Amino acid sequence: MDGTGPARTRRTGESEQLAAHVLGGGRVLSRGQRREPWHRDVQGGAARAAVFGISDGLVSNVSLILGFAGATPAPGVVRLAGIAGLLAGACSMAAGEYVSMRAQTELFERELSLEAAEIAADPAGEQQELADIYAGRGVGPTTARELARELSASPELALATHAREELGIDPEQLGSAWGAAGSSFVSFVVGAIVPLLPWFLLSGTAAVIGSVVLGAVAALAIGATLARFTGRSPVRSALRQLVVAVLAGAVTYAVGAVLGVTVT
Ligand SMILES: [Zn+2]
């Protein structure tokens, strides 16, 4: 080991701490940050993610239930299939969301701690880098230098600025993996339970009609809600969602009917 070993280790530890601080909501840039209320939330969109989760649950369980119902087994079998589909889908969505959020956060943490180490090792060079970035975006050289100097006032501020300007990461936009997993589980369940409800009260054709009607109403509501996020016509959006759900359900119902005949 050479003489720089321990110093290097200490510096890396500090960089990681700083990165964790900035990632963990060390609110450096949001002071006084205001956004015009008419902008839609393009990036975050937890509500939008929830609507998509509900839509996934609905379409997936409408298809599953109608597929089983198409084969006309006992209502208890359809009910069991629907419950299994609900749980399997919700767990799969939650697990997928958790893994992808963790991987993304780990990648960001690594990039941020590298950047923090660079800022610690060569603050002047990093400040110049910022000035070059602003100059490259059309800011005059004097203003660019001034901006870079002010935004490099503290290591936290410098790191948050480099994260945004150089890496394109918004440290405050990173959510929690458990939160994302939990909300995708819940939203899938909300969607998946809708076409399942009639099977607790009805059987046969009445239950099938119940699933189709409830599924259609839910699909229209989901489509109309999505239109609030996209700013498009709610009627078109609702009808598109309905067509997608109907197609998915019709395909599996037909397949279920064909398979049901050959299996039994
Ligand atoms: Zn940098």
Image (cartoon, grey):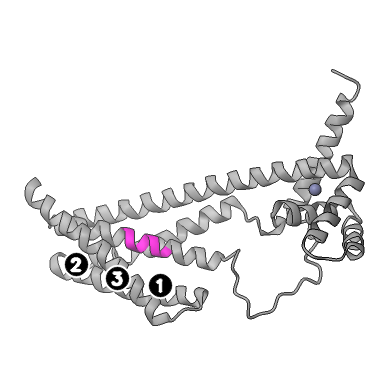
Q: Residue at x 19, y 55 (%)?
A: 68
Magenta residues (range): 54-60
Residue placed furthest toward the top: 1
Q: Residue at x 37, y 76 (%)?
A: 238
What's the CA distance linking mark 2 and mark 1?
Answer: 21 Å
In the structure shown, which secondary structural element does the residue marked by tag 2 occupy? helix
Mark 3 nearby-residue class (10 Å; few <14, some 14–19, many ≥20): some
Q: Nearer the viewer, residue 168 or 55?
A: 168
In the structure shown, which secondary structural element does the residue marked by tag 3 occupy? helix
At label 2, the amino acid type is Val
Looking at the image, residue 87 sits to the left or right of residue 262; the answer is right
Residue 222 tag number? 1
Name the residue carrying label 2: 208
For label 3, being within 8 Å of ligand 1 is answered: no
Image quadrant in which the N terminus is located: top right
Q: Position of residue 101 (x, y in %)?
A: 57, 49
Mark 2 nearby-residue class (10 Å; few <14, some 14–19, many ≥20): many
**Image height of 73 relative to 51, above or below:** above
- The numbered mark, 2 or 3, whose residue comes first in the sequence reads 2
Q: Quadrant of residue 190?
A: bottom left
Name the residue carrying label 3: 243
Q: Depth-wise, is mark 2 or mark 3 nearer the camera?
A: 3
| Residue 264 shows in the view | no
